[in-house]
Amino acid sequence: MTEDGHGKQGANAEPTARILVVDDSPDILDIARQWLEMEGYTVEPVGSGKEAVARSKSGGYDLVITDLAMPEMGGMEVLAHFAEHYPNTMVIILTGFGTIETAVEAIKKGAFDYLTKPFRGDQIIHSVKKALEIKRLKTENLMLQSVVNEYHTLERIIGRSKAMQAVFRILSRVAKTDSTILIMGESGTGKELIANAIHEMSDRSKGPFIPINCGAIPEELLEAEVFGHEKGAFTGAIRERMGRFELAHQGTIFLDEIGEMSLRLQVKLLRFLQERQIVRVGGNRTIAVDVRILAATNKNLEQAVAAGEFREDLYYRLNVIPVTAPPLREREGDVVVLVNHFLRRHCAKYDMPVKTFSREALAALEHYDWPGNVRELENILERLVLLTEEEQIRLGHLPARIRSQAGNEPVIEVELGDQGIDLKQTLSDLEDRLILDALKRTDGVKNKAAELLGLKRTTLIEKMKKKQMVYADEGD
Ligand SMILES: Nc1ncnc2c1ncn2[C@@H]1O[C@H](COP(=O)(O)OP(=O)(O)OP(=O)(O)O)[C@@H](O)[C@H]1O
Ligand SMILES: [Mg+2]
């Protein structure tokens, strides 16, 4: 036993815990207080439910121990009050023999435990200790959970490059605010993924995330889709309907491809951004909506503004915090990490052992300029996983557009080096490269290619078959 600041035995368990005891019997209050103070807890006894509720406003109770049957306000009401306003406060119920059923009901409503009167000192202390321990674990777990959530959310966005690290830093800083964010970047760079991550890292993560693709919905329908409509607003509007803004209340709305929005709707959106309320199509009442706005575009909006296609005032309203998803060709080192990521994911998805890449094939992927960015890489990986029968994916398996960019490099240089070399592999890579080179030079005419390689045409075809090379047809 320690002699700590309180000078009391057993105070090490939860020495600073504050406990509110509620009972209309002064005797019970006295006994409970004696036992608990001996354990080092801070105890505040009150004689009625009303007083308990009044005291609760001072906040910070770790635990409430309340009698069930009290005049005016009973224990169930005290429990309901704390469950609603102070969900982190634990509640233990005291009950006489006649009210055990109610006590069980109280547990269902969120009380941690109940004690039947008369109780012994060790019983109440045991229950209190357990309650405080659970509370501590819950708090720890919550904190851990939010750290883990942020970690996992950003974790889903793969990127080791400086360019992506810079994006992550911005995201961690701005996600929690309510600011409007404009996400820019070429197609397939992960703008939607970023929007999702922002929502999940924000305090709105429990609310809805509602995307709306302004480019995919015809102009006539978009307005009703965004703002909703009243019954009879137009032919076919047989019922009133909530728009996406209303659906996103207390959450996040993601306006994807904002650059595609018509000038007419841009005016309406601007009005919303100023007033934070909407009017449904065909209606006149205003509805206040609490949403955080994220927008994305692969257009250069400044150019669109200059061309008169996008309102300048709206552009400034949306571009409060700009986040740019860099194109894959500018993310140094990311291709390899992404290849690994998607390789694992797709192999797992199709229940296959994880394949490998030959050095040459990987180099070709790194070299390619990825006009379709991460989406293109993801699609190619999925296809390679599905279509390559061999365990190793080699240059010849790659789509022609990737091979042809790689083809400009000098023929591989081979060195034994300190690490040694996989001879079979290297020779096979070299063979791939030379065959592809020959096919390229002869525009895919196999007779001539075979000639260049000093092979019989049938031998070349056989090799290509074995290597699963498709040349004439692009294969993608
Ligand atoms: N950094 C990344 N890590 C992992 N997956 C990614 C990454 N970036 C994009 N992806 C994946 O690539 C695909 C395309 O991403 P997303 O839809 O977010 O791109 P986008 O920028 O919205 O494209 P578009 O402009 O064509 O709509 C998605 O399947 C997404 O999960
Ligand atoms: Mg998108």
Image: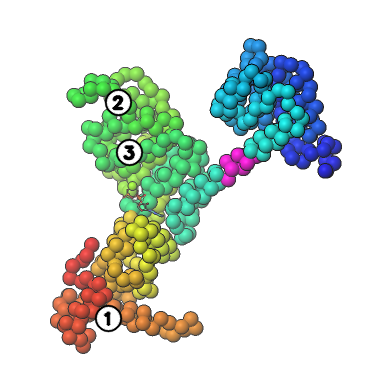
Q: Which residue is mark 3?
A: 212
Q: Position of residue 46 (x, y in %)?
A: 72, 19
* First along the sequence among labels 2 and 3: 3
Please report the bounds of the magenta region as a residue range: 136-144
Q: Residues within 10 Å of mark 3 (few under 14, many from 20)?
A: many
Q: Position of residue 110 (x, y in %)?
A: 57, 29
Q: Which residue is mark 2?
A: 241
- State the residue in front, 60 or 169: 60
Q: Position of residue 185 (x, y in %)?
A: 36, 51
Q: Position of residue 30 (x, y in %)?
A: 79, 22
- State the residue in front, 125 or 324: 125
Which residue: 31% across, 32% down? Answer: 226
- State the residue in front, 400 or 101: 101
Instruction: Answer whether residue 359 is magenta in the image.
Output: no
Q: Which residue is mark 1?
A: 434
- Residue 302 seen by the camera: no
SS for dot 2: strand
- Residue 368 seen by the camera: yes
SS for dot 1: helix
Foreground disc of the pair 2, 3: 2
Query: Amino acid type of disc 2?
Result: Arg
Which residue: 28% across, 23% down? Answer: 240
- State the residue in front, 58 or 315: 58
Between the residue at mark 1 and the residue at mark 2, the CA separation in whole angstroms equals 64 Å
